[in-house]
Image (cartoon, grey):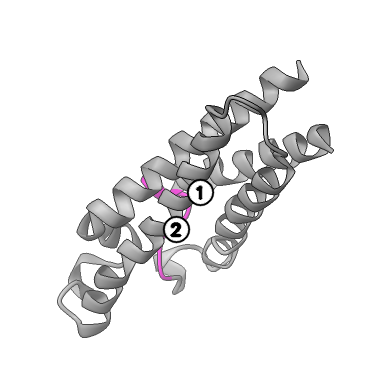
Amino acid sequence: MGAAYLLLVLAVNVLWFGMGFALFALRPRRALRLLIPRTAHGETSARALAASLPFLGGLNLALAVLSAACLWAHEAPPLGPVFLASAVAHATQWCWNLPQLQRGGRAGGAAWDVLCGPMQLIFIVDGVCALLNAVALALDI
């Protein structure tokens, strides 16, 4: 189970980080709709955020490529650093959504609703992926 689990977690990383790249780098206006109210889209700060989201997409792409390279490597490289970096990436995304969740979403003054629509999926998947990568790290050590 150990080797198969490690490959599965790498594949999940490729898919999830690849989806992050597609959303943030290729469709930043769509991502903006998840993060701020539609009424604020014309503000200067919203335009700046939309222009900066492709940077987040680029980081997601880098993690997807790193996971894919390890997944398809002919000789298995040490995977611990990949799982560690991926666990931290997922965990920070999950943790930085907690204050938004604790404020009660936009109605409570938070920047976005965590338990509504696509943000709920992102919150859940990042939490699960953080745990999957942490377990993979423990298995690979």
* Mark 2 nearby-residue class (10 Å; few <14, some 14–19, many ≥20): some
Front position in the image: 112 or 138: 138
Taking 60 as reference, is 98 left or right?
right
- Residue 116 seen from this side: no
- Considering the numbered disc 2 on the image, is that residue within a helix, a strand or a loop? helix
* Tag 1: amino acid: Leu
Q: Which residue, given by chain and number where applicable, does mark 2 sit on?
A: 59
Q: Which residue, given by chain and number where applicable, does mark 1 sit on?
A: 63
For the residues labelled 1 and 2, the Cα–Cα distance comes to 6 Å
* Tag 2: amino acid: Leu
Residue plotted at (39% across, 48% down): 20
- Considering the numbered disc 1 on the image, is that residue within a helix, a strand or a loop? helix
Taking 83 as reference, is 58 left or right?
left
Total marks placed: 2
Give the number of the disc on residue 110: none
Residue 138: say if magenta: no
The N terminus - image quarter: top right
Residue plotted at (38% across, 58% down): 58
In the picture as drawn, the residue positioned furthest to the front comes out as 75
> Where are the magenta residues, as a range?
111-119
Taking 8 as reference, is 31 left or right?
left
Q: Position of residue 57 (x, y in %)?
A: 37, 56
Residue plotted at (81% across, 32% down): 139
Contact? badges 1 and 2 (CB < 8 Å): yes
Front position in the image: 108 or 135: 135
Q: Position of residue 13 (x, y in %)?
A: 53, 38
